[in-house]
Image (cartoon, coloured by chain):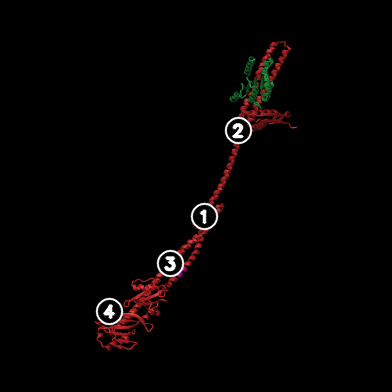
Amino acid sequence: MTMLILVVDDEPDIEALFRQQFRRDLRQGRFAIEFAASGPQALGLIAAAGQRDIILLLSDVNMPGMSGFDLLARARALRPDLPVVMITAYDDEATRRRAETGGADGLIAKPIDFGLLRAEVEQRLAGRGAAP
Amino acid sequence: MKRTLSLAQRLALAFLGLVAAVLVINGTISMWFAYQDATETAVRIEQEKADAAAERVLQFIAEIEQQIGWTTRADWARVSMEQRRYDFIRLLRQAPAITEAIFVDGEGRERLRLSRLEPDLIDSGTDRSADPRFVGARRHGTWYGPVTFRRGSEPYMTVAVAHAGRQAGVTIAEVNLKLIWEVITAIRVGGTGYAFVTDTRGRLIAHPDMSLVLRETDLSALPQVAGALAASGERVQAARGLDGRSALSAHAAIPRLGWFVFVEQPTVEALAPVYAAAYQTLALLALGVVLALLAGVVLARRLTDPIRALQAGAERLGQGDLAQRIAVASADEIGTLALRFNEMAARIQDAQETLEAKVADRTRELAQSLEDLRAAQDRLVQTEKLASLGQLTAGIAHEIKNPLNFVNNFADLSKELIVELGEAMDRAGSALEPALRGEVEELCRMLNDNLAKVAAHGRRADSIVRNMLAHSREGKGERRQVDLNALVEETLNLAWHGARAERAGFNVTLEKSLDPAVGQLDLFPQEFTRVLLNLFGNAFHAVREKETPGFQPLLRVATLAAP
């Protein structure tokens, strides 16, 4: 089963961006990416994923309704081992601290440095390859 | 309860008291002097009469003695009985008061008795040696017997005179004192004044009322008689008349006999002028009091009426009638006071008017200040708006990063894709396989799409910045055709991010229901954006106010095209 990356953002264009960035990986079938426009939708995807291996949950912090931090807590409640990286435009001290206390595995500032993100994904993929 | 007298009453009473006091003092003093004068005058007159009466009595007795003296000469012892008898007849003739004459020789035997009523008696030889008349005369030279009454009412007294020479005889004469009685009875002092005579023991011997004398009334108990008997020489003040009433009394002593002549007048009568004067004084006092009362009332009225006018004026002034002036015409202190009072009222009135003018001025100034304050408040509100706009701007600056994220990333991607396209073209050479051609075509399509997106996000960023600037800038924008739904969405986004920027933990679910039929509208987009921003801002503010744990706010925004 292909490993899964979940991307949560209320910006619809995020899907195109990610699909093009990781087009080769997706073409080769190294992993799949699923997109959610809100927190509740993301929780639905997590639930629907069942036993599939979600190597990373990428979530925007600023979203109408359920915020990224709310989603972090709820997702952790569903799957405690789920790696979560927050994405924010507010790259300040308060947000960093909140991410840290909330148990996020990382925080990426906008505009997203896809080189950094790719390294993160590769690291996770390598971890999965070694484990089984 | 103590009653308070008015000023007029007090003044009238004071005046009355003063006049009454002066009248009473004056009356008392004049009465005292009148009393003194009346008393002294009465007593002086009495004294004169008493002295005169005493003189008359003394003279009477002296004459009797002188007449008897003819028979007591030394050579009379040697004359014959006939001669003696003749001398006695002459004695009786010359001294009518003598009613009986007796000659007692040196051995105490009666030798001759001549009487106007009885026959002569010669050499009766009756022993008179123990007779008090004989003994008294032999011892004292002259002896006066007690006063006796004979023949009913006439007073008699025995006078015995010893003859000159050794073992000489004694001539005894019975003397009728009727003359003394006449003298005393004749004395009149005033209307009811009278005189009387007492002997050495205070027994009454002459008085106008004979019955008192006949009863041998003892007057030694009367103060004036007791005083005379005591020979103290002081005039007795508290004399009492025979009738027991108070009397003014004077007396004179008759030395040889030891008698006293009293002349008295009842005090009531003696002091009648004083009493009259007293009544007069009392009448004057009453009249004076009445006059003083009237004068006091009139005077007090004249004094207090202006004061009352002053008081009434002051009360009206005190009640706020500042136009009030006091009409007091007098030129005295009260008139001056009223004048000052009126001046003061005028000044107060003036001051109040000035005060009212000042208050009006201050009110105008205050109103002006209020206007200024309101203007300042408006400016402050504007400033506050600008401040929140600053926060909004900061939020926007962050949010710009989102579209920029896409702009940058898609731009990078486009570069990559172009590179890949170039590589693909190289590999294809001149003869392109259909598959490759397809890929190239796909890449081209993607590239075109991306470029379109870059442009779109660029426009978006531009729009945000433009809106932001439009909000912060004052003044009217221009009227143009606007996609209302796009404007609403953009503004809602802006407001939400602004609220987020204002408070990090803030969140609210947004539910948009935008009717596509709304389409393009002709409006002022800047003003409309400002209205929407305020509307959404108020909604977020209301949500923040109600925020409690578990609270899940929802903002529903809808547009609807009118049918």
Range shown magenta: B277-282
Q: How many marks on residues?
A: 4
Q: What numbered label is drawn on residue A128? A: none
- Chain that bears disc 3: B
Check whether the beta carbons of the residues at disc 4 and disc 2 lie within 8 A of each other.
no
Q: Amino acid at mark 3?
A: Thr
Dominant secondary structure of the residues highlighted in magenta in the image:
helix
Dot 2 or dot 3, earlier in sequence:
3
Q: Secondary structure at mark 2?
A: helix
Check whether the beta carbons of the residues at disc 1 and disc 2 lie within 8 A of each other.
no
Dot 1 or dot 2, earlier in sequence:
1
Check whether the beta carbons of the residues at disc 4 and disc 3 lie within 8 A of each other.
no
Return the residue nearer the eye: A67 or B320.
Answer: A67
The residue that disc 1 covers is B339
Q: Are marks 1 and 4 on the same chain?
A: yes
Return the residue nearer the eye: B114 or A37.
Answer: B114
- Chain that bears disc 1: B
Q: Amino acid at mark 1?
A: Leu
Q: Nearest to the eye among marks 3 and 1: give it.
A: 3
Give the drawing colour for chain B.
red
Residue closest to the far right: B563
